[in-house]
Image (spheres, rainbow, N blue to C red):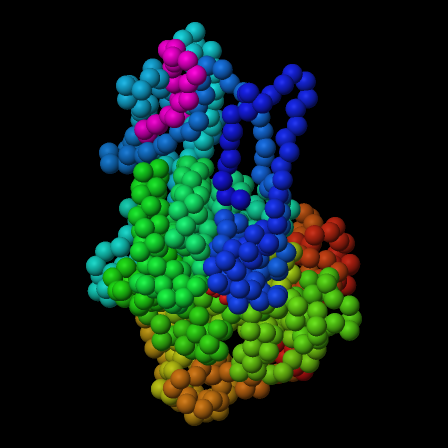
Amino acid sequence: MFRAWEWDIKELLKPGENSIEIVLASAVKFCEALAHKRGLGHLLYPNKIYAAIPGMMRKEPCNFGWDWGIKAVTCGIWRDIRVMAFDTARLKNITLAQDHSARGKVGLTIHSEIERLRDTDLKLRATIQLDGQTVTTVECAANDTRPPLTATITDPQLWWPNNLGQQPLYEITVELLDAEGSTLDTLHKRIGLRTLRLDRQPDAWGESFRFVVNGVPFFAKGANWVPADAVQSRMTPDRYRALVRDAAAVHMNMLRVWGGGLYEEDAFYDACDELGICVWQEFTFGGGVSPLDDPAFRDSVIAEAHGQVRRLRHHPCLALWCGNNEMEMGDQLQDQPSEPGKMSWKDYRELFDKQLARIVGDLHPGCDYWPSSPHSPHGDRRDYNNPTCGDAHLWAVWHEGKPFEWYRTCPHGFNSEFGCQSLREPKTVHSFTHEDDRNIASYIMEQHQRSHGNARIIEYMLAWFRMPNSFDHTLWLSQVLQGMSIKYAVEHWRRSMPRGMGTLYWQLNDCWPVASWSSIDYHGRWKALHHMARHFFAPLLVSGVEDVGKETVEVHVTSDLLEMIDAELRWDVTDIEGHPIEQGSQKVAVGAQSSNLIRTLDLGHAVQAHEKRGLLVWLELEAPGQPTSRNMVFFARPVRRPRVFSPRPKHLELSRSPGLETLITPKGNGSFDVTLTTARPALWVWLELKDYDAGFSDNFFHLRPGSPVTVNAQPTGQLTTESFAEQLLVRSLVDTYR
Ligand code: BMA
């Protein structure tokens, strides 16, 4: 599935019409036979064959089913077929190497791979353009002895990840010319001028794991990318662009193309190039077992790796090549494999430490390679999720049922997987259910759940919230729960910068309308998590850490900005009705790429005057040219072991009728501004249109008296102001249980 196959068919062609016949065998039957042959038959569960199968062949692993993936094994040709003809010579590929060592210019070396059918004088010409203007043109004779083409780009416009700068893209056209100067072949590549490395240095906590772009370390903020449709051939460039645009819209700067999926379509990487989304690209091993001891299998992987690295290496978004997903997690690797389903470390190291590393080193100069995710580079590799080095997949929340507070016990530097599931919003669930299916324990709803079950979502939900009063509100509340969980984790790790330098939550997207860890559902609808990501990933972040035992709130300010900025910090402590108890403000000089504890609010006296269940601490950080960062910390009656657990919203006696008001202003472009005010605090306020999807500039936010919030709503259909008003639903947390 992952190789471009090419055959010389000249001898087979005949004048007139020719036909190509392709015979496709069943992948399932092939893998089952191989699994039985390798003694893995016991792992062929009837409905979840993914345990033993996906690694058996070079096909999209999650296509066989996953803990969020439907088992719908596709078959067929999924990329272009074409007959190519050439006589004298052709330009097969070009390798581009950038030299940023000199100030104010970038050297470009263009190695051209020419296949020639006869020995004639050839020439190469490279034209480099930016925004349609030719920056430089270079030529050279194209014979094996001559050095490669080199070009110097003066006043280079550097490529930067999202929010760190712009994404200028240079067009490179390389022509192969014959002695008379007529063009035999042409190759186009669009590149970005930048250096982008994985930097691992000894540091105060062990060894760093951070990405450095143009010499600047940056905090990687993003998520894991899985195939966006269970039937890959249904994907379109527009769907790719919409998903990547949605990632960039919430300040993401990295997506991990997870190893259990596939090497994505060009349209995906093009969108990442244009929007500054760095790509952590995995070779397609999703974990589990592969026949690494089979030379034919290994050779196939090597050929695939050559082809994919050559196909993708020119994209400026490519930040890292990674050998596989989670093959070093668990015990499937052994020194002397004792039973079927185990692989030998020897075979593993040969492929993942040597062969793939060498291919990346040879074919993709300037890009780093990481053998596996997660990987601990200094232990015996069984100490994965090592908090002092490497990257980590932290799954005690969700998979082990640990409370969200467990995240605050994790000092890991780069978290490439962590997550909490949610259910899809009513519009999506209604699209695949009948009325009597709409119970989260119904057969249909459970068929759309491939992990530990919807019960685990309810279990987490009731730890934080009251039992919702309807099926639809259960769906919505599961999204608030998920958003809170990831916000809790990401804010913790952003506060730990520079020890913490990356959070990629599991997962961005879905391949079908399933209960999953995604923040955007299969139909492209943003879940609460995606809206909250716009705030917890924003360059400037104010966040609070409550200590119910000490009755304090620490106020932290984190900045990913590349320059210092003067900001104004405000805090307001109110009771549950929103009546002010105390407030204050101070100027804060926020250092570039910094995270600091600014002050600790002592709430002791406020707690005395108001039972702990009733305190709300509202935080705001304003700075010129930056979206205001808002946050809220609440105190509620401590649950058991107050030192471990945060206060719970379910114990807040929020007003059942907060007095939410909306003022609608048409903007003339089909969108409407909705200004919301409230008489009493309303938590997790969300807007929805009954029958239309809409883009909202904000959603699932806290609202308090005297601080209106204006949201721009962009419905998918043309609505009059009256019909928009009639369509608009505004609810908040209390509506889910009132
Ligand atoms: C990790 C990922 C995926 C899985 C996710 C949720 O294992 O690598 O394999 O879908 O957790 O369980």
Count of marks placed on residues: 0
Vertical relation: 238 (above or below) 157: below
| Quadrant in the picture for residue 303 | top left
109 in magenta: yes
264 in magenta: no
Residue at the image point whose x is 41% and y is 77% from the top: 406
Q: Position of residue 586 (x, y in %)?
A: 36, 69
Q: Position of residue 532 (x, y in %)?
A: 52, 64
The span picked out in magenta is 108-128
Q: Which residue is at the front of the view, 386 or 304?
A: 304
Relative to 44, 173 lies left or right: left
Vertical relation: 702 (above or below) 290: below
| Residue 250 appearing in the image | no
Residue at the image point whose x is 31% and y is 24% from the top: 148
Residue at the image point whose x is 66% and y is 68% from the top: 447
Vertical relation: 303 (above or below) 209: above
Indicate the quadrant containing the C terminus: top left, top right, bottom left or bottom right: bottom right
Residue at the far front: name it: 37
Vertical relation: 254 (above or below) 461: above
Majority secondary structure in the magenta region: strand
| Residue 485 appearing in the image | yes
Q: Position of residue 329 (x, y in %)?
A: 39, 65
Residue at the far top: name it: 180
| Quadrant in the picture for residue 489 | bottom left
Residue at the image point whose x is 49% and y is 46% from the top: 263
Q: Position of residue 68 (x, y in %)?
A: 57, 63
